Amino acid sequence: MSSSPLKGVSGAKLWIGLAATPVVITATALVILPILPSWRTAEAKAEMAASPAPINGARAYGYLKDLCAIGPRPAGTDANTQQRKLVADHFTKSGATVREQPFRTRHPLTGKRVDMANLVGSWHPERLQRVVLSAHYDTRPEPDEEVDPVRHKLPFLGANDGASGVAVLMELAHHLGELKCPWGIDLVIFDGEELVYGNNPRQGEYFLGSKEFARRYADQLERGRPKFRYVAGFVLDMVGGTNLVLNQEPNSLKLAPDLVRELWAVARQIGAKSFHFTEGREVLDDHLPLNNVGIPTIDIIDFDYPYWHKADDLPENCSAQSLEEVGRVLSAWLALPRKTKGRR
Ligand SMILES: [Zn+2]
């Protein structure tokens, strides 16, 4: 997610940067809104929460360690590509139809071309109402928050800020074939969330992958494709820290309030104590581009993680239990009994 100078700035400022296709976006929102399911009876629905899938936290933590073992994984590096192939292979073996969304940018320091790609793993690709669960998989090029110039040069592994969200998605992948969920599910890993150097001045642009994903979706809707619609979206960011604290993020509350309430109600129902009913700090993250094209999307994020953008964002500061809890809440939410409107 965004660095501290951006944090606390109202979402409105970011809209300017995202609004490359404002007309399309407005039209898209109008098209989508009538088919959105109602989240209004969040607490009532949560009482019916199905048993979550048998999420295996130890296995998820194993994935987190595997990803970190590749080394730092900034956008445009071989390690980043290696990670994407590893996840693609895993999604395929778990029954998904996998595709990439390639795109490119200029490196913020050298101006050289940087090739990037989002990866999409789809379960039940024929279903017309879909949910997107996502996380960024690139890691920040440097541990910017290290004040000491020596520590600033240490490698940044992004165990929590990067690998944790991907690890939860990889664990969920095992269960999606079996899960009783009325919707199709897309697990998406975004590239280029933070190909950004420093904070003052900041060089680089945030959220390149989620902007690309949103742009393609809006573009296809504009042309009458795709036939499917996303009814909800989740961004997982820093969900693996030891002593996980998940407050409700203000932009999520503003843009997809009923989805926040419903997920937290499910968390309460299944006793997931890391989900706190407290409003947290406002974060600019990959959920904003998705909301901007009419996908109600929330950010599940622990912004109090003490090693944010520091060299100690390492596997030993993450835990299997945290990953398991987030996976259980998401799987229970997906399995909630629902009435869906129209064709699936
Ligand atoms: Zn970050």
Image (cartoon, helix red, strand yellow):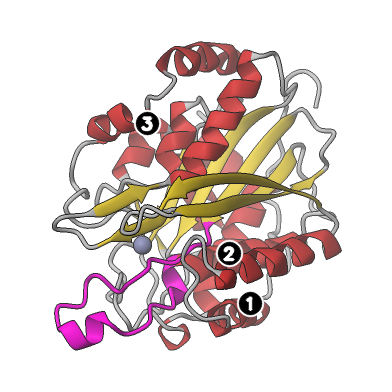
For the question of whether residue 189 can be seen, the reply is no
- The magenta-colored residue range is 136-161
Instruction: Give the CA distance from mark 2 to mark 3.
Output: 24 Å
What is the quadrant of the N terminus in the image?
Answer: bottom left
Q: Tell me: residue 86, above or below residue 315.
A: above
The residue type indicated by label 3 comes to Leu
Crowd class of label 2 (few under 14; some 14 to 19; many from 20; radius 10 Å): many
Residue tagged by mark 1? 63
Instruction: Give the CA distance from mark 1 to mark 3.
Output: 32 Å
Crowd class of label 3 (few under 14; some 14 to 19; many from 20; radius 10 Å): some
**Whole-percent x, y for residue 299 in the image:** 43, 48
Instruction: Give the CA distance from mark 2 to mark 1.
Output: 8 Å
Q: Residue at x 47, y 38 (%)?
A: 211
Residue tagged by mark 2? 166
Magenta span: chief secondary structure: loop
Q: Residue at x 16, y 52 (%)?
A: 5
Tag 2 near tag 1, CB within 8 Å: yes
In this rendering, would 84 be left or right of 244? right
Asked if residue 155 is among those painted magenta in the image, a careful observer would answer yes
Q: Tell me: residue 77, above or below residue 183.
A: below
Residue tagged by mark 3? 18
The residue type indicated by label 1 comes to Tyr
Q: Identify the element where label 2 is drawn.
A: helix
Asked if residue 279 is among those painted magenta in the image, a careful observer would answer no
**Whole-percent x, y for residue 158 in the image:** 43, 73
